[in-house]
Amino acid sequence: QVQLVESGGGLVQAGGSLRLSCAASGSIFRINAMGWYRQAPGKQRELVAVITSGSSTNYIDSVKGRFTISRGNAKNMVYLQMNSLRPEDTAVYYCNARYGSEWITTWGQGTQVTVSS
């Protein structure tokens, strides 16, 4: 079992920046990737960014060049630096962990990001 706690969300004007943090605890030694998802009102949750244990990263097209996912020196931390924020980035952001090819099904409480125009 792994527990995930997100933080760092808030209200920001369009063009602003936020940095989200995620702390993982529990059975983290078998995690091979961490990711950030988001869910906007009335929409499905989507995977926004992924970082593997080898530090490879992937992003959805809409955030490429604006968001950066990274890991801390402590292996249980993952961050999402969000720049040039847009109103359409407004959502609850969740981090998640992957074992093998499967993302875990237990979610943290998420952190709300609201971007005003």
Image (cartoon, rainbow, N blue to C red):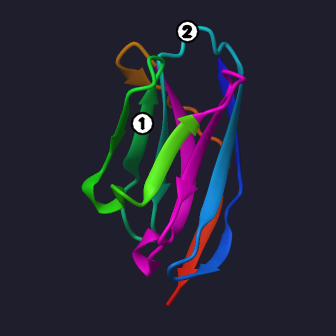
Secondary structure beneath dot 1 equals strand
Q: Is residue 50 magenta?
A: no
Looking at the image, residue 82 sits to the left or right of residue 20; the answer is left
Q: Which range is magenta?
A: 71-98
Looking at the image, residue 1 sits to the left or right of residue 97; the answer is right
Q: Is residue 94 magenta?
A: yes
Are the two marked residues, 2 and 1, in contact with CB atoms closer than 8 angstroms? Answer: no
In the image, residue 80 above or below residue 73: below
Classed neighbour count for the residue bearing mark 2: other residues with Cα under 10 Å, few (<14), some (14–19), many (≥20):
few
Going 55% across and 37% down the picture, which residue do you hit? 70
> Going by the picture, which residue comes out furthest to the top?
30
Q: Residue 28 is drawn in which quadrant?
A: top right
In the image, residue 87 above or below residue 23: below
Tag of residue 30: 2
Mark 1 residue type: Val
Mark 2 residue type: Arg
Q: Is residue 88 visible?
A: yes
Going 45% across and 25% down the picture, which residue do you hit? 55
Locate residue 14, reporting x and y percent: 51, 82
Locate residue 16, reporting x and y percent: 57, 76
Locate residue 94, reporting x and y percent: 56, 48
Mark 2 and mark 1 lie on one chain; the one further toward the N terminus is 2
Locate residue 20, reporting x and y percent: 64, 52
Q: Which residue is mark 1?
A: 50
- In which quadrant will I find the N terminus? top right
